[in-house]
């Protein structure tokens, strides 16, 4: 049936090209949307990987989110995941710590004999040992003790009548117990100098110019300051978590808005397709039924006008939705970048805090906490593979005389030089740590005690050749060592005690030597 003239054929061709061009544009928009969605998924995955390891309670949620967005981005499900993550951040439990203060309570019970104080101390000790204990930090423990004893300062000695026994308290044992608490406390770097001063007084209480009561009072005041500082740090962490929660909520809103823009665009396109399809069907039906060419021409023109109007309306609405979507995506990407940078800064800060908690601030070597952790790992490896494991304990000779003769700065330099030589001249597989004061410990895996003795003697000779001048005087450095090998039935304590006996033997035989047990 030939009823289309040249003009109508050209008009139909123009409409077809215009419609196809619009479909091409729509396909480009969808590809752009897919690329941006892929970019968003990559940011979410990178952010989750970057944040993983900060908290074991949040890690499963991060893994779940990462797995969810690997292949596709379902805004509804992602919104639920973000809500779950927000709740997980709010409900992160604080670590529980337990304290062992049996020796300290024995000392306090002998110093404070009033019935009310005795009862309060016993109750505090029971609370400390119970599962419901709410005391988590050594500073909290000393605050509670201070509340009990501050009404009457404890005497260092209790003198009975002439016929009664005179009870003497060994302040060295008490000082050793307190020093152990300070070693695991994790003193912030800002308090390093003050902590060092208190530790020196506790190391040699008889030589201190302060009375022992004053040393303990200074200790309690120092711990209170540390507690206040840590509480302020905790507030900063809480504020950061609150900030993260707020950012996650904003991220959730942006994802929802972007999804709404895409949904609206899809609806408009479907509406256009349906309108064009309806117009074509009506044109076909009319062409079959009509016998008038003029009527058919009018119908075709009307159909083309309606389709052109629908396409123009769709194009305008889709352009607005696409612009809105691009704005949402740009804001979302900027928000993700900001969160990634903030996470990087937090990760760097946590790394610094971890280093301060696990390393000695003066020498840079691992501290006693790190040694205890590494010792457990090496014992487990020994038990599994039956490989030899040797422990060496080092002690700088006449260290107190060095401090008294040349000054504490020279003493610090002796410690840093010794630590540097021990660290530089050991194998990569060996582990060296500052145990406390002038003592160092060394773990030698896959090494029996005879081979270890040769190695530590070489180190001892290297250190003997290391010295420096202070105020025009030569400061000699020598070091003594005790060596022992881990045996079946050994514990961490028995291994250390045997090495310590070997060290005592080196001191007894004149120092600057290594002994083996």
Image (cartoon, grey):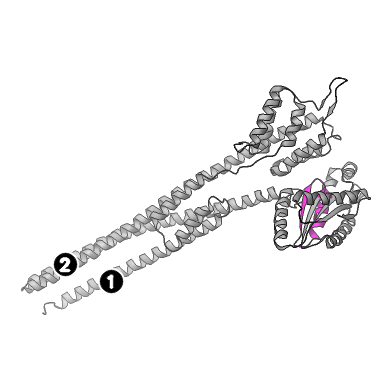
Report which quarter residue 49 is drawn in: bottom right
Residue 216 x, y percent position in the rendering: 76, 32
- Identity of the residue furthest to the front in this view: 489
Q: Who's the residue at 48% across and 61% down the image?
A: 42
The reply to whether the magenta stretch includes residue 479 is no
In the picture, the quarter occupied by the N terminus is bottom left
Q: Is residue 356 above or below residue 378?
A: above
At numbered mark 2, what does the secondary structure look like: helix, strand or loop? helix
- In the image, which disc is placed on residue 316? none
Q: Residues within 10 Å of mark 1 (few under 14, many from 20)?
A: few
Identify residue for label 1. Answer: 20
Q: Name the residue: 42% across, 65% down.
A: 35
Q: Where's residue 397, x and y in %? A: 89, 49
Height in image: 231 above or below 500?
above
Q: Is residue 110 left or right of residue 320?
A: right
Q: Is residue 135 left or right of residue 196?
A: left
> Which residue is the site of mark 2?
303
* Residue 219 percent location from the top left of the image: 74, 34
Who is closer to the viewer here, 56 or 15? 56
In which quadrant will I find the C terminus? bottom right
Q: Which residues are magenta?
A: 412-439
Q: Which residue is farthest left?
A: 291
Mark 2: few, some, or many residues within 10 Å (few <14, many ≥20)? some
Is residue 197 visible to the viewer in this orientation of the structure? no
Residue sitting at x 66%, y 31%: 124
Q: Secondary structure at mark 1?
A: helix
Q: Residue 204 placed where, x, y %?
A: 84, 38
């Amino acid at each position: 049936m030939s009823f289309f003239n040249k003009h109508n054929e050209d008009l139909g061709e123009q409409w077809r090209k215009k419609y196809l061009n619009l479909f091409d544009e729509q396909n480009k928009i969808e590809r752009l949307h897919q690329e941006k969605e892929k970019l968003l998924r990559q940011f979410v995955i990178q952010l989750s990987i970057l944040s993983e390891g900060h908290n074991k309670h949040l890690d499963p949620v991060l893994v779940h989110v990462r797995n969810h967005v690997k292949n596709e981005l379902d805004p509804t499900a992602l919104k639920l995941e973000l809500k779950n993550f927000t709740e997980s951040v709010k409900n992160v439990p604080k670590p529980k710590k337990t304290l062992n203060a049996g020796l300290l309570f024995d000392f306090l019970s002998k110093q404070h004999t009033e019935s009310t104080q005795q009862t309060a101390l016993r109750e505090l000790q029971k609370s400390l040992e119970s599962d419901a204990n709410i005391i988590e930090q050594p500073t909290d423990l000393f605050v509670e003790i201070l509340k009990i004893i501050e009404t009457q300062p404890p005497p260092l000695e209790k003198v009975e009548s002439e016929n009664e026994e005179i009870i003497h308290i060994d302040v060295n044992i008490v000082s050793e117990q307190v020093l152990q608490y300070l070693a695991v406390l994790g003193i912030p770097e800002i308090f390093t100098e003050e902590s060092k001063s208190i530790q020196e007084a506790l190391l040699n209480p008889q030589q201190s110019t302060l009375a022992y009561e004053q040393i303990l009072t200074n200790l309690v005041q120092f711990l209170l300051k540390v507690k206040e500082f840590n509480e302020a740090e905790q507030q900063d962490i809480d504020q950061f978590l609150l900030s993260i929660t707020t950012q996650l909520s904003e991220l959730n809103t942006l994802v929802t808005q972007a999804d709404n823009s895409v949904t609206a665009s899809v609806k408009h396109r479907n509406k256009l397709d349906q309108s064009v399809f309806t117009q074509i069907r009506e044109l076909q039906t009319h062409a079959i039924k009509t016998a008038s060419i003029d009527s058919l021409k009018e119908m075709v023109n009307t159909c083309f006008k309606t389709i052109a109007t629908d396409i123009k309306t769709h194009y305008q609405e889709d352009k607005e939705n696409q612009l809105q979507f691009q704005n949402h995506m740009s804001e979302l990407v900027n928000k993700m970048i900001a969160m990634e940078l903030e996470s990087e800064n937090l990760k760097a800060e946590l790394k610094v805090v971890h280093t301060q908690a696990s390393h000695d601030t003066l020498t840079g070597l691992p501290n006693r906490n790190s040694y205890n952790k590494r010792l457990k790992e090496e014992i487990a490896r020994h038990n599994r593979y039956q490989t030899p494991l040797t422990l060496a304990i080092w002690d700088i000779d006449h260290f107190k005389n060095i401090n008294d003769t040349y000054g504490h700065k020279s003493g610090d330099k002796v410690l840093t030089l010794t630590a540097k030589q021990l660290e530089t001249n050991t194998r990569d597989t060996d582990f060296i740590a500052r145990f406390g004061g002038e003592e160092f410990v060394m773990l030698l895996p896959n090494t029996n005690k005879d081979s270890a003795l040769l190695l530590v003697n070489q180190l001892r000779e290297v250190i003997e050749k290391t010295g420096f001048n202070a105020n025009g005087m030569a400061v000699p450095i020598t070091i003594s060592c005790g060596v022992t090998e881990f045996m079946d039935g050994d514990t961490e304590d028995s291994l250390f005690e045997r090495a310590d006996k070997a060290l005592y033997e080196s001191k007894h035989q004149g120092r600057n030597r290594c002994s083996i047990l």
